[in-house]
């Protein structure tokens, strides 16, 4: 029952029982109750706005002829406010699909006067569509300050915001992450967020490989191993990690366990590699082969042993990242790339042709990219940003938590 209908019912009951005077009195008493009840006025106003939005949205669908062949309109199940606008959950009528709504997206946006609309089919139920009305570009301005993690790396961490302005969170345990993008796209800043989260958990071991030696240097005080542009040292460290991985699996086997768990004998071990191109294409041919094989082994078998590999490169090409290595990374993020092919090298073949190409991103919007993680499709997002001063403060905090090691 709508609010208007409820008021009318009260009015008619009052008139029937005691005339117009009683009708006015009953409505007045209800108004006083509403006014004196904390939060009730706000909820009532929200309900009125929701009803008004539903009626408006229904009129828009009718005017744009979003009607099934049986004459039915998609049913609005829920409307929620998001930082970029509204998100509407639609139940589709029989004989209708989310693709048909998406096909008239430009017409719907023009009719609404919105910046754009986005339609996404529910991954679990094809009869449900998620319709986003975008009034402003949430990614046109920097993401909010990073909520610095204070707990364990076993917990999910905030990476940035999506197109709706909602927080994007990921969990790193049992995952590996590949970052790619052209110089200046925000790759190193994104990598710093992930390393900071690992460094701030003193139970996490940290190994850093930096082809330029300067990007990851602030975190060297928290790392067990820090390798610069040295192929021999990089190979030795990766081989040592493979040995550690085998040792962990031997202990797990003896304990009758399949993988490490929080609070167990072994903690997480994060291996961060910046300038992956240097290590994959540098040195002699036999060195490159040796390093690639050690990295492949670590990425393919290390997850259950608690080893997390985060690799970043400025030159995402098939020559730098072979598909047999790239496909082992369950999480991938493509920041601004120069070509659709480079974007596909990071995200996987075919995503660019489906509209998920990092070559279309604004070159001036650092930290904006496509993240392929928990969902079925890449998510366009903008990462949080840590300035040099922020990194210095967090690096010092991490060293203090680790006892200055």
Image: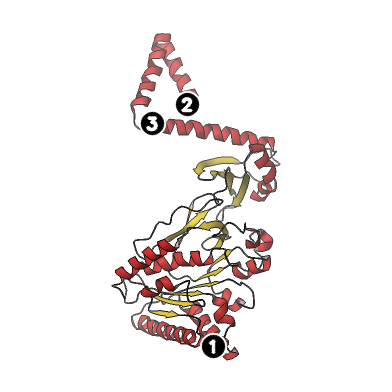
Relative image position of residue 181 (x, y in whole percent): 59, 67
Q: How is the image coloured?
A: secondary structure
- Neighbours of disc 1 within 10 Å: few (<14), some (14-19), many (20+): some
Query: Do tag 2 and tag 3 residues touch (Cβ < 8 Å)?
Result: no
Who's the residue at 58% across and 74% down the image? Answer: 326
Q: Measure the C-alpha gap from mark 2 to mark 3.
A: 13 Å
Q: Nearer the viewer, residue 352 or 360?
A: 360
Q: Is residue 179 above or below residue 49?
A: below
Label 3 SS? helix
Who's the residue at 53% across and 51% down the image? Answer: 141
- The residue labelled by disc 2 is 3
- The residue labelled by disc 3 is 40
Sequence-wise, the earlier of marks 2 and 3 is 2
Q: Is residue 74 left or right of residue 4?
A: right
Q: Is residue 403 left or right of residue 362?
A: left
Who's the residue at 68% across and 35% down the image? Answer: 63
Q: Is residue 67 left or right of residue 377?
A: right
- The residue labelled by disc 1 is 290
Q: Nearer the viewer, mark 2 or mark 1?
A: 1
Label 1 SS? helix
Q: Is residue 204 left or right of residue 377?
A: left
Q: Measure the C-alpha gap from mark 2 to mark 1.
A: 72 Å
């Amino acid at each position: 029952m709508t609010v208007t209908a409820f008021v009318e019912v009260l009015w008619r009951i009052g008139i029937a029982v005691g005339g117009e005077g009683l009708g006015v009195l009953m409505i007045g008493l209800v108004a006083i109750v509403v006014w004196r009840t904390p939060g009730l006025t706000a909820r009532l106003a929200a309900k009125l706005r929701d009803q008004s939005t539903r009626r408006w949205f229904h009129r828009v669908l009718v005017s744009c002829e979003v009607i099934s062949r049986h004459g039915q309109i998609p049913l609005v199940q829920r409307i929620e406010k998001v930082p970029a606008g509204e998100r509407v959950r639609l139940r589709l009528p029989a004989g209708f699909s989310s693709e048909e709504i998406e096909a008239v997206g430009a017409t719907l946006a023009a009719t609404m006067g919105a910046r754009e609309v986005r339609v996404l089919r529910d991954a679990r139920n094809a009869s449900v569509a998620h319709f986003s009305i975008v009034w402003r570009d949430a990614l046109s301005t920097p993401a909010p300050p990073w909520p610095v993690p204070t707990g364990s790396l076993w917990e999910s961490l905030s990476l940035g915001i999506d197109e709706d302005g909602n927080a994007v969170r990921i969990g790193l345990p049992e995952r590996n992450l590949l970052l790619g993008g052209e110089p200046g796209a925000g790759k190193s800043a994104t990598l710093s967020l992930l390393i900071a989260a690992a460094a701030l958990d003193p139970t996490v071991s940290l190994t850093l490989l930096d082809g330029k030696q300067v990007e990851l240097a602030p975190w060297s005080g928290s790392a067990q191993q820090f390798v610069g542009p040295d192929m021999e040292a990089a190979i030795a460290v990766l081989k040592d990690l493979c040995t550690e991985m085998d040792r962990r699996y031997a202990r797990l086997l003896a304990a009758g366990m399949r993988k490490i768990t929080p609070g167990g004998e072994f903690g997480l071990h994060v291996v961060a590699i910046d300038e992956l191109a240097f290590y994959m294409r540098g040195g002699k041919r036999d060195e490159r082969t040796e390093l690639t094989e050690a990295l492949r082994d670590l990425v393919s078998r290390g997850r259950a042993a608690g080893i997390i590999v985060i690799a970043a490169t400025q030159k995402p090409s098939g020559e730098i990242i072979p598909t047999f290595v790239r496909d082992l990374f369950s999480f991938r993020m493509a920041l601004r790339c120069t070509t659709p092919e480079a974007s596909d090298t990071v995200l996987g073949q075919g995503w660019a042709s489906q509209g998920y190409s990092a070559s279309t991103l604004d070159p001036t919007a650092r930290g904006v990219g496509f993240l392929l993680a928990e969902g079925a499709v890449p998510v366009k997002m903008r990462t949080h940003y840590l300035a040099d001063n922020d990194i210095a403060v967090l690096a010092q905090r991490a060293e203090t938590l680790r006892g200055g090691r």
